[in-house]
Image (cartoon, grey):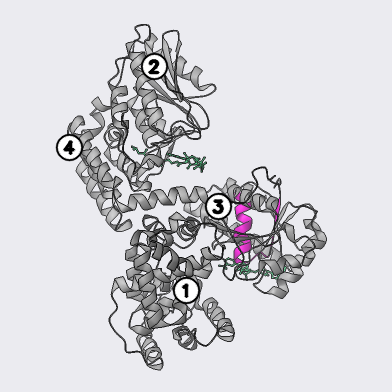
């Protein structure tokens, strides 16, 4: 018998228990164990019903993602679930934690399902570039109808046990010991004389509804919201087979479509994104036994755009937080802004008024540093000015208790210098949130040269509590994300001087999959920020590093972005829809002329190379300098902070997929044509010449 699946007799009930930590993924050992156990229970004349339950934190969370791309091993999951469903004795799945993907497919092949109230069920395969490949696309529509199944399968989002119960996926909500609940339910079935109830044999939910209309509507929605994605339309095709074909043929169709997804480059990229996110939180040189400090209270210095968002993150995590501002007026304004932000969630229906009041009760305002003497962590988010930061950190050093973590949200200043304003640089760390801080998942955890392991580990733990994707980075101008985006932004401006338009460049990058093009993004954040950085750079950059001039010309014309109603685009009052700006062609032509550039037609492919390869080259320099621990960490930063398309895997994965030799050759050409900015990273050159990938590092 298997190590990870056990079979035990409790009277007439066979209890099959899966124990494959951490998430009971359905790897080969679990599949074999399930098949053997169900067969043994089927063969045992004294067994009248079967209960399937999982140990640990969750029911089965799906197929073992690590097995994708490797030679398949028998029994396959479809074979296992079809065998379970065909069984002649009633089987009951007992769900806790999450039944996801293959896990839910196993559950719906059992004849009955019960769950604890906190459980969630879903088919998230689409998020990995796949579709449910073990009968999920055929059985879920039979349980919940085609329209709901399409919603669940195409979004990949799980639903709670209560909703699943209402929909008929779950038969009963239970409490207490899982095995005991399963046995009780099975005994009740036997007492009532109930036998197997096979989902695959049901047709009631497929009849009397316009399934074709549901399919057409979903296809149109995908076309609009997820153009270019490989698996969503295939999910729909598989669900279509559930009502158009008999079960056996539908299952066959599902397998064919699954196989197409499995070999798609998007699947590889999305699985890379999944594992990279989990890997990012691991710090290579952190000793295993590093203690983590307790964080029960927090403070934020500066209640501006970022400070309020950060305070909201703490309140959302149930941690009381004080906002310290320069005056009582500024303090009250910050509290008002926090309330307004929550108010918008109430308006949208994503938060109740009660929850708003509860969270606001965790946020208080102060003006005196003496009020921060008991907090466990402080995040400074005042103006981006070293003089101001110095005063703040000196005050924190004088007032905060020993062991308090002193963090800065600076986006460009030297964290090591900031740490020196205190007598405890080991307690200083960067917590670089992204705007809006309460929405964006990314958190760069900036490790200063004196930051202690304990503080670093605690900073990562804080990120986890705040439900952020935390990535450790080293100190340099702009850290990882902004340092790279600067290269991208500058190249996109150069493209305007060479003949491109904002519409074309944004369009090409959107087609590549970015949520927003660089110019729409600039208009949103305001051109003045970029200009201030540019002006600073002009004073320090060596002469060979030329800078584009379009921004300066736009500023002279008062085109500062959405806040002035005009920037790279124009915006009608009250609208955020970008429309072509008729003033821009003259500005771009003047810039081209000034640089002696003859404007020319640019292809989408060229636009992608000039902008994305700029990210890649800088990413390689960042790796070389040890600012990021691994290439996949850079991908995680771009996927979670900059709208980089997950199906491209992140800039470094994308480079690997193109081939570093090709990327390097193109960067060498750009270096020749466009000068110093394009000096190829030594690491890129080395890997390209050795025929290696970033992933090999
Ligand atoms: N296969 C292999 N490993 C998995 C896994 C899976 N399906 N799901 C999670 N893991 C691993 C993670 O990589 C992580 O490993 P690590 O500790 O070495 O870094 C560990 O389990 C814990 O995972 P999380 O850090 O994500 O733990 P959380 O508690 O935050 O979340 C979870 C748990 C909600 C189950 C989350 O891990 C998750 O969403 N997992 C993926 C679920 C999924 O996509 N299932 C579908 C798989 S495809 C499929 O089933 C195909 C089928 O239709 C044929
Ligand atoms: P902001 O101008 O909106 O807010 C700054 C706030 O700090 C103001 O409310 C001001 O009254 C307060 N303040 C100034 N001096 C103070 C002092 N001595 N004591 C207490 N409060 C003081 O600025 P924003 O955008 O919130 O930026 C804050 C920090 O966050 C900066 O370091 C910035 O670089 C960083 N950051 C900003 C991002 C953004 O997109 N805005 C993104 C990531 C980081």
Q: Which residue is mark 1?
A: 487
- State the separation of the CA atoms marked 1 and 4: 51 Å
Magenta span contains residue 426 = no
> Quadrant holding ligand 1?
top left
The residue furthest front is 690
Using the image as rendered, state which of residue 432 and residue 39 is in the foreground. Answer: 39
First of labels 4, 3 by sequence position? 4
First of labels 3, 1 by sequence position? 3
Secondary structure, mark 1, is: helix
- State the separation of the CA atoms marked 4 and 3: 43 Å
Q: Which residue is mark 4?
A: 244
Q: Which numbered circle lies on residue 50?
A: 2
Secondary structure, mark 4, is: helix
Secondary structure mostly seen in the magenta stretch = helix
Looking at the rendered image, the disc whose residue lies closer to the viewer, 2 or 1, is 1
Using the image as rendered, state which of residue 46 and residue 453 is in the foreground. Answer: 453
Q: With respect to residue 31, does 70 lie above or below?
A: below
Q: Is ligand 1 closer than 8 angstroms to the Cβ of mark 2? A: no
Looking at the rendered image, the disc whose residue lies closer to the viewer, 3 or 1, is 1
Q: Return the x and y of residue 87 as percentages of the image width and height.
A: 30, 18
Residue located at (38% from left, 69% from top): 664
Magenta span contains residue 303 = yes
């Amino acid at each position: 018998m298997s190590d990870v699946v056990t079979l035990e007799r409790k009277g007439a009930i066979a209890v099959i228990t899966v124990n494959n930590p951490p998430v009971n993924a359905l790897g080969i050992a679990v599949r074999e164990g399930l098949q053997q156990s169900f067969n043994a229970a089927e063969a045992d004349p004294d067994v009248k019903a079967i209960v399937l339950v999982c140990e640990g934190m969750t029911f089965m969370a799906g197929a073992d993602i690590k097995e994708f791309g490797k030679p398949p091993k028998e029994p396959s999951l479809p074979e296992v679930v079809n065998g379970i469903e065909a069984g002649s004795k009633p089987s009951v799945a007992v769900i806790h934690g999450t039944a996801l993907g293959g896990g839910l497919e196993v559950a719906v092949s059992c004849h009955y399902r019960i769950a604890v109230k906190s459980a969630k069920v879903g088919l998230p395969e689409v998020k990995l570039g796949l579709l449910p490949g073990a009968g999920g696309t055929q059985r879920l529509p039979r349980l919940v109808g085609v329209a709901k199944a399409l919603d669940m399968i195409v979004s990949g989002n799980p639903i709670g046990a209560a909703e699943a119960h209402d929909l008929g996926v779950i038969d009963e909500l239970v409490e207490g010991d899982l095995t005991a609940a399963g046995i009780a339910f099975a005994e009740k079935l036997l007492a009532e004389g109930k036998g197997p109830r096979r989902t695959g044999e049901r047709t009631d939910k497929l009849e009397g509804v316009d399934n074709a209309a549901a399919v057409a509507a979903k296809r149109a929605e995908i076309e609009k919201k997820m153009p270019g994605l490989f698996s969503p339309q295939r999910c729909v095709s598989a669900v279509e087979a559930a009502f158009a074909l008999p079960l056996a043929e539908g299952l066959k169709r599902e397998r064919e479509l699954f196989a197409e997804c499995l070999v798609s480059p998007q699947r590889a990229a999305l699985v890379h994104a999944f594992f990279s996110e989990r890997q990012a939180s691991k710090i290579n040189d952190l000793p295993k036994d590093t203690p983590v400090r307790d964080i029960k209270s927090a403070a934020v210095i500066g209640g501006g755009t970022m400070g309020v968002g950060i305070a909201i993150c703490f309140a959302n995590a149930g941690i009381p937080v004080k906002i310290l501002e320069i005056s009582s007026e500024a303090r009250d304004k910050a509290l008002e802004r926090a309330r307004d932000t929550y108010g918008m969630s109430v308006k949208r229906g994503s938060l109740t008024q009660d929850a708003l009041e509860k969270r606001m009760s965790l946020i208080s305002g102060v003006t005196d540093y003496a009020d921060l003497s008991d907090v466990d962590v402080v995040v400074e988010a005042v103006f981006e000015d070293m003089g101001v930061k110095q005063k703040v950190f000196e005050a924190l050093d004088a007032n905060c208790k020993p062991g308090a973590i002193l963090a800065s949200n600076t986006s460009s200043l030297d964290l090591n210098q900031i740490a020196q304003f205190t007598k405890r640089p080991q307690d200083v760390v960067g917590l670089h949130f992204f705007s809006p801080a309460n929405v964006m998942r990314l958190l760069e955890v900036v490790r200063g040269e004196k930051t202690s392991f304990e503080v670093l580990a605690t900073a990562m733990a804080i990120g986890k509590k705040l439900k952020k994707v935390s990535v450790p980075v080293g100190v340099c101008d702009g850290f990882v994300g902004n340092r790279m985006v600067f290269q991208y932004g500058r190249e996109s401006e150069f493209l305007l001087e060479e003949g491109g338009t904002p519409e074309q460049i944004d369009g090409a990058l959107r087609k590549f999959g970015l949520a927003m093009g660089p110019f729409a993004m600039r208009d949103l954040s305001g051109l003045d920020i970029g200009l201030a950085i540019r002006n600073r750079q002009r004073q320090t950059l060596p002469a060979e590093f030329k800078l584009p001039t379009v921004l300066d010309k736009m500023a002279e014309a008062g085109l500062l972005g959405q806040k002035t109603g005009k920037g790279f685009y124009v915006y009608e009052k009250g609208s955020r829809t970008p429309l072509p700006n008729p003033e821009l062609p003259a500005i771009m032509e003047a810039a081209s002329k000034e640089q002696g550039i003859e404007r020319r037609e640019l292809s989408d492919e060229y636009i992608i190379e000039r902008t994305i390869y700029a990210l890649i080259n800088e990413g390689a320099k960042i790796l070389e300098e040890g600012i990021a621990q691994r290439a996949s960490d850079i991908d995680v930063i771009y996927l979670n902070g900059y709208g980089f398309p997950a199906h491209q895997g992140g800039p470094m994965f994308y480079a690997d997929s193109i081939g570093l030799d090709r990327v390097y050759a193109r960067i060498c050409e750009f270096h020749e044509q466009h000068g110093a900015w394009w000096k190829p990273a030594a690491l890129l050159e080395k890997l390209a010449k050795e025929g290696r990938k970033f992933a090999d590092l």
